Amino acid sequence: ASAVPPRPPHEIAVQALEALRRRNLIADGAFKEYYSALSDIVRGYLEQRFRLRAPEMTTEEFLLTTAREARLHGTHRRLLGEFLTESDLVKFARHLPTIADSERAYGAARRFVDETAPGTAPAEDTRAAG
């Protein structure tokens, strides 16, 4: 019997994001738990997709590493930076996001995963670098 190939990291991440959404943490006001789960999914995806070891890195270290190793396009690094910084504010600085903030964070996480999935990177080169 042949072994089942491992599922691609972006598929795992998308499934995790959709599962998180179904938990309705925002509706319950569990912003901290929501953002923690959201950033864990994104970090986990990055580790598997780009072979980064990142669970114990701070956001700054994490972004520096992705910049140094040039594994992410500038656009994606900015998206990631904004997303992780906002997550940190909620998790550690008692920042209380709005439901709209939470939706935007989810959208950013989802877009990040979708746009960095294998086979989707070349689209970056068709836009003028800004």
Image (cartoon, grey):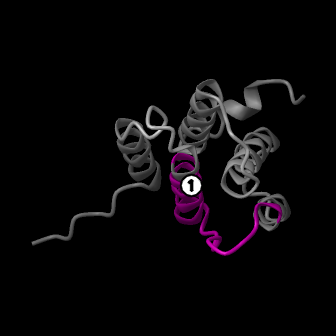
Q: Nearer the viewer, residue 21 or 118?
A: 21
Residue at the left extreme, as displayed: 1
Magenta stretch: dominant secondary structure: helix
Q: Quadrant of the C terminus?
A: top right
Residue range highlighted in magenta: 34-60
Q: Is residue 5 above or below residue 126?
A: below
Residue 119 falls in image quadrant: top right
Residue 19 falls in image quadrant: top left
Q: Which residue is mark 1?
A: 36
Where does residue 21 sit, x and y in percent of width and height?
Answer: 41, 37
Disc 1 secondary structure class: helix
- Is 38 one of the magenta-colored residues? yes
Q: Is residue 2 above or below residue 13?
A: below
- Crowding near pointer 1: few (<14 within 10 Å), some, many (20+)? some
Q: What residue is rendered at 64% in x and 40% in y?
A: 121
Q: What residue is rendered at 60% in x and 44% in y?
A: 116
- Is 36 one of the magenta-colored residues? yes
Q: What residue is rendered at 61% in x and 71% in y?
A: 55
Residue 108 falls in image quadrant: top right
